[in-house]
Amino acid sequence: MGQRVDRERFSEAEFGRFGERLAEQLVTLRDLLARPGFGAGPATVGAELELFLVTPDGRPLPRNGEVRAAAADDRLVPELGRYNLEINLTPLPLAGRPFSALVREIREAMETVDAAAATQGGRVVAIGILPSLSEFDFTHEALSDESRYRALSRGMRRLRAEPFRVSIEGAEKLELEVEGVILESANTSWQVHLRTAPADFARVHNAAQLATGPVLAVSGNSPGFLGRRLWEETRIALFEEAADDRDVERRDRRDRRVAFGSGWVSGAEEIFEACVRDYEPVMPMTSEKDPEAGGAPRLDELRLHQGTVWQWNRPVYDPADGGHLRVEMRALPAGPTAVDMVANSAFLLGLTAALAVEPVEEFPFAEAYRNFYRAAIHGLDASLSWPGRQEAPAHLLALDLLPVAAAGLERVGVDPGEAEWTLDVIRERVRLRRTGAVWQREALGDRAADPAARARMVTRYRELALTGRPVHAWPS
């Protein structure tokens, strides 16, 4: 989220100054993106993995500060809930064998966290929504002991006079009302970052928007919440509603604070500008005037604000290495295994690379939008549209798109063997119709409403994840 936030209370005057700084930094960013050669360089891929801490019997363990201290690893940062931690993985060149390297680092980092969690009587698990969560895990005390999360919670409550209401309808229906943003902590994701030259940003971002639907359809790992059977990737609906600041005073704003978007874009600056124009700040932490890092302006306020508007695919400005842009792809769930997450990434990055040289903007954005939500709701059975094709079930479309993704990976220099093994994981998962969401539903059967059964399922899920075998190879 950019700079460190070490306060949780701000005056109205500080909100005003922060808005002025955002306007100034938008001008700086426009000039920077127009500078010849800015952000040029080889494509790199990075990732963030959000995790749950659990007790040996599969229930949430609210001790992320203690686990982080025990791990003493700079890659770890606390997340919103005390039972969440995030691993920031090392960026790698996209060319070559990045996916094998990612698998190795994920496993090594999770072993580090697991060992640290054991000192607190806990374990770690990568799963989109932890099935053993209960309503009692979303109190104010569950918020991480970090100023930035208290500031975020306070800032969101400042914007929304009404309680946050969650209504999700799937096989069953869930309705909740809470006072703060703590429900966001129920969601953990696998976020993929692709470094992109400014001149290529619009093509790559739009391609990622179109690619996300079919990839999400084969990657579901969050089939319910609080014992209700909901969407194949319930995390999408839960995050959108749990962070929706559109109360009675903001009903006319089209998009939630977490959103897919409403049209193809023409450049990164367009998204940054909309973020400042349409969304009010929640944490007006200001820095010294225009400090620089490595010759590039830091734009701390703009980066901080952008970090509180959670588009499923969004731009990231980073002042490191002379400054550069990334497309952050946020829709994929955490888990079930390192191999599954990396295979999902290969499918998404390969499709994005292939589509980035196509005129995807000729395809109706409304169809890409529908694809995204249909995929989240129905998973492999979603009916999806695609350029030049008849509407088809996601499992059939995905199989047809695997060669397209392979060609895209080859185009950006990924080793052919690397593309083959990762996409084979997707092929087998689809062929066997066995995503993480499917496994969780089968493992629970008709006991989804039983908290003890859900906790037992978490322990079994963790045991199988530790084998390293992808979810399609797991027994029920």
Image (spheres, rainbow, N blue to C red):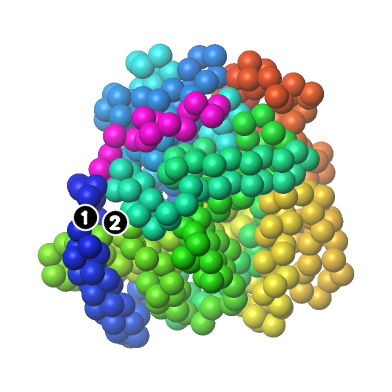
Judge from the rendering whether residue 182 lies leftward or rightward of residue 128; answer left or right.
Answer: left
Check whether the beta carbons of the residues at disc 2 and disc 1 lie within 8 A of each other. yes
Q: Name the residue under label 1.
A: 10
- Is residue 146 on the magenta stretch? yes
Residue 342: horizontal and vertical position, in percent? Answer: 57, 46
- How many numbered discs, if any? 2
Relative vertical location of residue 219 with respect to residue 129 in this rendering, above or below: below
Q: What residue type is labelled 2?
A: Met
Determine the image quadrant of residue 121.
Answer: top left
> Which residue sits at x=59%, y=72%?
262
Residue 423: horizontal and vertical position, in percent? Answer: 68, 50
Q: Residues within 10 Å of mark 2 (few under 14, many from 20)?
A: many
Magenta stretch, residue numbers = 134-148
Judge from the rendering whether residue 18 lies leftward or rightward of residue 93; answer left or right.
Answer: left
Relative vertical location of residue 371 with respect to residue 168 in this rendering, above or below: below
Instruction: Give the position of the N terminus as an image quadrant.
Output: bottom left
Nearest to viewer (mark 2 / mark 1): 1
Relative vertical location of residue 235 with respect to residue 63 in this rendering, above or below: below
**Residue toward you, 27 or 17:** 17
Q: What residue type is labelled 1?
A: Phe
Q: Mark 2 points at which residue?
A: 283
Label 2 to label 1: alpha-carbon separation: 8 Å
**Tag 1 secondary structure:** loop
> Which residue sits at x=28%, y=39%?
146
